Every structure is written in C-alpha cells, then in structure tokens.
Amino acid sequence: MKQFVKKILGEQFCHKISLTIKYIRGLKKVVTKRTLVVNSDKVEKIEEYSLKDKHVFCGYYDLVPIKDQKMLVHVLDKKGKTNVREIELGYFDMNDNKYVKITNTKAWCWQQGSRLRWSNKSKNIIYYNDIEGEHDCFREYDLEKNQIVQTIPYALYDIDPEEKCGIAINFSRLQRLRPGYGYSYLKDNTMGQNAPKDDGIFVVDLKTGTRKMLLSLYDLAKLTDDELKYEHYINHIAFSPDGSKILFFHLWTEQNQSTWKNELCVINIDGTNLKILENEYRVSHYDWKDNMELLITVIEKPGEKEFYCYYNVETGEKVRIENKNLKQDGHPVHAKNSKIFYSDTYPDENCMQQLFEYDTERNEYTLLVSVFSNLRLNDEKRCDLHPKLVKDANQILIDTTYKGCKRSVLIANLKDEIKK
C-alpha cells in the first residue's frame, strides 16, 4: 500500500508529509519534555556556542575543530536566501565565548561545510576549500598574518597526517548525485557521463600543488558495472592514522533515481592493493580505530536492520558488534585508547537525537545526551549531531537545532573520573 501511494503522489511529496507528521508529533512531546536532556553521571557540563539570528555549525564528524581554545565554525544568516552561495568562516575564543570572523568561502555544503580544519603542524594555520574563478580550490590561511598564504587549484577532501599530500575529488559531481555533501557553486561538467575516465580520486602534492590520478571512476565502475549503466561517484574519504592508506566509498545510482548502492574500499596511497571490504550491504559511516581496523555502520535493510561492524583492512575479516542498542546508523569516533567509541542517532519518533558512549570491552552502552532535532531543517539541510571528539580534553562537540530553528554547537564535557 505504501509503495502504491508513493507511486501515485510521488516519493518527494510523501517524504515531506512524513516529515511534517513526525515534526508535529515531536512538538507535542516538547511541550511536556525538555529539548535537552543530559546524563549528569557522565557529563560534567554542557557549553553552547551560538550567534543571534545565525546558523553556527562545525561540520562533519571526522574533523576536530578545536585547537588552543579556538573552535572553528561556519556561520550563515538564518533569515538569508534559501540557496546561499557564500558562507562565513570564523572561530570562537572559548576563553570568553567571543566570535571572530576569519573570511568567506563559496565552497561549502550543509553536511560537511568547507572541510575547514586546523593544521597539525602550525599553531596559526587553517585549511579550507573555496572557489577561484571557474574551479574549486584549497586554501591555506595564516590567522596571525590574517591572509591566504597558499592556494592549490583543487578542493581537497582529506589531508594526510604529515600534511604532505591530500585527496581531491569532483565536488560538483558529488553534490549533484548526493546533495548536501559536495559544492553547488560550479556546474558539474561530467553530467551525462556515467563513469568518466578522467575523473575519480586524485593525490595532490601540498608542496607543489600538482596532482595525479590514483583511481578513475571508469576503472572502479568496470569492477561492478561492466556495461556502465549507472552513474558512479566517490564520497567519504579518510586517511589511515599513519597516512599509508585511504578508505573511500564508491557509490552508483541509476540516472534520475533516488536509490543507490555502494561499496567500502581501501587502497594504498601509491595506488596499489585496492580492496573491496564490503559490497553485499550498504555502508554508511566510518572511523579508523587504528591502522588495521575500521569501524563501519552498515545498513542491511534500510530502516530495518542496521549495525556496527569492525573490518580488518588486511584480512577482510568482519566482526559485527552485537548489542541491542546498536541497531541504528550513526557517526562513530574512537577515544584515544580505541576501546571506547562515541556515536549518535538520527531523530526518533519524538524528534530526539542521542549521543552515546560504547565500551567495546564491556559491551556497555551509555546514553550521554538526548537533544531535540528541528525537522523544519530537513533533507540536505538536516542537522545530524556529527560528534567530534577532542581526545586530550575529553570533550565532545555536536551540531544541533534544538532551539530557535537554527544551528548551534554544544560541547559535552565528560567527567574526570570517567576519562579513559
């Protein structure tokens, strides 16, 4: 019956109706329940960073935005145009909660921002993606000099820990095929090409700015789609802790369709030893536990069977975590000792999202924070918690929309006695 109704009314229309019903139900609960619930046994305090009539958010969960008590953020007018072409970059001085603007960028999206990050090597250097002329680019910005000190003519998804090279992909193609994760400022010149030979994953030398292809979409596509019937693209790229490998998701979708498939891949940074670790089930999110193991959220059946699973990148061995509380997709990140990870959930029937801790040795799940999610911001503008762990400070940052129908950042400070 549901499929029949979708066919008559259209999938997008039915999706909007579903979100509206869920939002109304959530508002009823908010009348009698708090929009922010904290486990005081585990969390010492919650700090909030926001600006009046502004969206404030950090971005994706794989980048830690805090360094020397400065927190990098993206800022956007709440009452601005629906499709904003440019966003502001800045930081909060966490000593006095003062906001300082840095610059603007035209290369950004709701889920991953501009891939804004701190340098691992220099105290005053930040990195982000931008648009220059008719191409995207990567900027190195010196906060002390208050100026751009280097521009590379390719936007980067990730940078190796030693900051010698980065990985570039086609963010315009990514945005077209997976809205909310790429950049919409420039036209996708590969439109109409299911698996172009001159597009794919590139390694970029951060010293010279030159790039070379690591793997083409054509070569990837031929492994699963010999007739090239589907549109192929890349998302979710992350260097291993030692910088010797990258993981990435290879995705494909039928043209003009919302359904898609993917596979989990790992390859050496020199282009050797490509491995497909998962192609039976859909993979969703990731974290490097160490140089040998990945933690992946896996979707066996969308909306029905979802689980967390460790993958050994050398042997391909899979170890599924069996716990009744880990049956939803989330964004995992490991603590310093790798025995504990933190993750989150999508909004439940009461529009509440959960941030939790999981101890892999004790098989112990602990809820840390439950927070209201405003479903008026949905689809590519939705706000996932995207937990970002500041390991040395034992702080967890989350992006939220729990009040005012705008984004703000909450920091959960964990108690000293449970620091691990």
Image: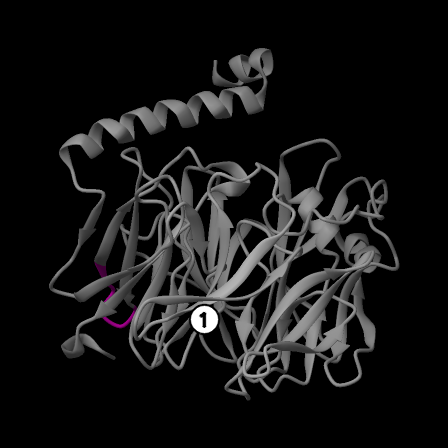
Q: Nearer the viewer, residue 90 or 419?
A: 90
Q: Is residue 398 magenta?
A: no
Quadrant of the drawing holding the C terminus: bottom left
Q: Is residue 314 visible?
A: no
Outermost residue on the right side: it is 197
x then y, percent, for residue 411 = 30, 63
Is residue 402 depicted above or below 58 in this figure? above
Q: Is residue 232 left or right of residue 285?
A: right
What residue range appears in magenta?
360-366
Outermost residue on the top side: it is 8
The quadrant in which residue 376 appears is top left
x then y, percent, for residue 9 = 56, 13
x then y, percent, for residue 77 = 49, 46
The quadrant in which residue 122 appears is bottom right
Residue corresponding to mark 1: 64
Q: Is residue 160 left or right of residue 231?
A: left
Is residue 50 depicted above or below 62 in this figure? above
Q: Residues within 10 Å of mark 1 (few under 14, many from 20)?
A: many
Residue lying at 47% horizontally and 79% vertically, measured from the top left: 290
Q: Is residue 21 left or right of residue 239?
A: left
